[in-house]
Image: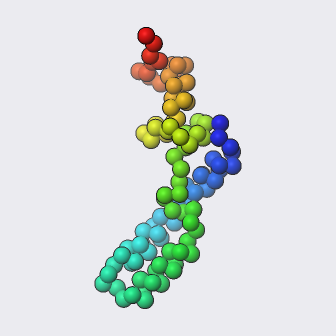
Amino acid sequence: MAKTSSIQRNLKRIRLAKRFARKRENLKKIIKNKKLPLTERFEAQLKLAKIPRNSSKTRIRNRCEITGRPHGVYRKLRISRIALRDLASKGKIPGMTKSSW
């Protein structure tokens, strides 16, 4: 089980990313638009720098929904490999069985 603080920190980053997504996108469009004057693009860059760093999508860590484990997480299921195996052994996932030979 991961530390509760790291799980909460990641949840905060997810909330911030959702809140500032549209604003970041608009500012990045202005910055990349070469037809606009340099001063306007520079002002957009300064505004982007004032937005919280944790609102960036790249700061979000893929974590297991059950345990909070940061490594070995299946993106599609959002569950770590260990939690997935445990659920499969208990028969909670339809069509999945633990292999034995």
Tell me the colour scheme of the image.
Answer: rainbow
Q: Residue furthest left?
A: 35
Q: Quadrant of residue 50?
A: bottom right
Looking at the picture, tell me which residue is in the foreground, 10 or 21.
Answer: 10
Q: Quadrant of residue 42?
A: bottom left
Residue found at x 65% / y 49%? 6
**Residue 93's spot in the image, x, y percent?**
47, 24
Q: Residue furthest top?
A: 101
Quadrant that contains the C terminus = top left
Asked if residue 13 shows in the view, the reply is yes
In this view, 44 is above or below 19: below
**Residue 80's spot in the image, x, y percent?**
52, 35
In this view, 24 is above or below 76: below
**Residue 85's spot in the image, x, y percent?**
51, 25
In this view, 79 is above or below 32: above
Residue found at x 63% / y 47%? 7
Residue found at x 53% / y 54%? 60
Quadrant that contains the N terminus = top right
**Residue 41's spot in the image, x, y percent?**
41, 83
